[in-house]
Each structure stands twice: as structure tokens, then as C-alpha cells.
Image (cartoon, grey):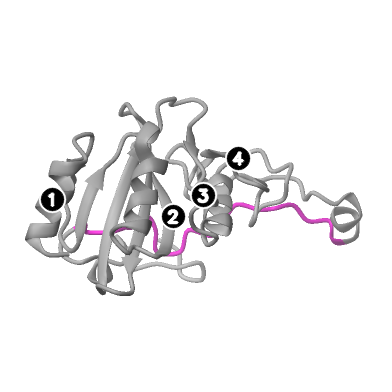
Amino acid sequence: MSEIEKSELLDRFTYLSERESSDHLAVNCPSEQLIEFCTLLRDEYQFDMLLDVTAIDWDVATPRFTGVYHLYSTAKQAYIRVASDCKDNIKPTLPSLVPLYAAADWHERETYDLMGIVYEGHPNLRRILMWDSYPYHPLRKDFPLAGIETPLPAEDVAEQTNLKVAAAPMMGGPFVSSGDGKMSQTEPKAKDESWNEEKRK
């Protein structure tokens, strides 16, 4: 997106604020205006493809959760990142973008599953990775990196295997991202690579 288009966008939508970004234009949009803004991005600014829906858990900050949307214009070959804060730290919600972008369906289900954000108006909001009765949201900051031992959902499987969902091995962890530079160059790496499951500390 050109600087002129970027300036026009921020001037037109006074409820937006520019978000710090090292690559593409990024804006903060209040959740009440998210549907309106994304509709206009699609219909007037040619952002016809939703690439990703994810979220950030800021842990002890308020607001705690921020939904993040990555949109792409196939006509302009341009990206925009839209962030929208959830108002409630205990029961976070955002409006669903499924009516605008069909691709939001599974993306929102995944973010609901792993972060616990409820997407209001989603046609089929249920877990996509964990089983329906799983009591946690594994990408939240208060979820231990090693996981939590949990009974398997099917009693017959647990009885036959005599297994539980065990905590994950912590080989080389904890894992951290530097946060410097482009996202593609800051994949999480182990802080301490001198040990693994076979060779203990």
C-alpha cells in the first residue's frame, strides 16, 4: 500500500490508529467498527483475501487479548494487518468475519480453541484441534509450556492404552523469539541447546 493510500485510509477512518510494524501497514481498529472497516477494505480497497486470524495474549496487561487479521489484495499485491482488542479479559469476544471472508471459518475456530476468544456470529464455533471437553486454551500465557496432564476424552482409549495426555517434553526449552527484524527471521529458538531428553542437564 502506498503512503498516499495509507494516509487516506487513516484520514477517512478516524477510529483507526497506526500500529507499529516492521513490514506492512498495520492498524488498530476498535472491535465495534471491525465489521464495517473490513467490509470496506474488501469492497473498496480490494483486500479480497483473508490470510490469517490469530491473537495475542498480553498476560497481565489490559486489554489482555488482541485479535489480529492479515489481509491481502491480489489486485494491488499489498498486505494490511488489522488488530482489534477484546474488551473483556475474562471472556474475550470479537465479531466473526465469516460473513465477509469464508476463510475466517477455520481460522477463528483455531484461535477460539487455542486462545479462548469467542467469535460472535460464527456459524459453527467449536474446537478444531483439541476435543470439545478439553478444559484449557493452550496458547494462553497462563498455560504451562510443558502442558497439563489431562485424561483422554474417550474412556475406551484410556482403558486400552492406560495412557493420559502427558505433559510435553521440554527438550531444549524454554523457546523464545528474539522479536528483532522480520518475522521470517525470528523463529523461536531454544535458550539452552546443551541438553535434550536423552542427555539431561
Kindly identify which residue carries mark 2.
53
- Name the amino acid, label 2: Val
Q: Are marks 3 and 2 in contact (CB under 8 Å)?
A: yes
Residue sitting nearer the eye, 79 or 112: 79
What's the magenta region? 161-179
Give the crowd class for mark 3: few <14, some 14-19, many >=20 residues within 10 Å.
many
Give the residue type at disc 3: Thr
Q: Position of residue 178 (x, y in %)?
A: 22, 59
Front-lying residue, 189 or 92: 92
> First in sequence: mark 2 or mark 4?
2
Look at label 1 and name its amino acid.
Answer: Glu
Q: Is residue 200 above or below residue 100?
A: below
Q: CA distance from mark 3 to mark 1?
A: 31 Å
Q: Nearer the viewer, residue 46 or 119?
A: 46
Indicate the secondary structure of the residue bearing disc 2.
strand
Q: Give the label, 1 or 2, closer to the camera.
A: 1
**First reached walking from the N terminus: tag 1 or tag 2:** 1
Residue 114 locus on image (x, y percent): 54, 48
Q: Residue at x 49, y 25 (%)?
A: 90
Dominant secondary-structure state across the stretch colored magenta:
loop
In the picture, the disc for residue 136 is: 4
Residue beneath label 3, please? 111
**Residue 173 included in the magenta stretch of the image:** yes
Q: Which mark is residue 190?
A: none
Amino acid at the residue labelled 4: Tyr
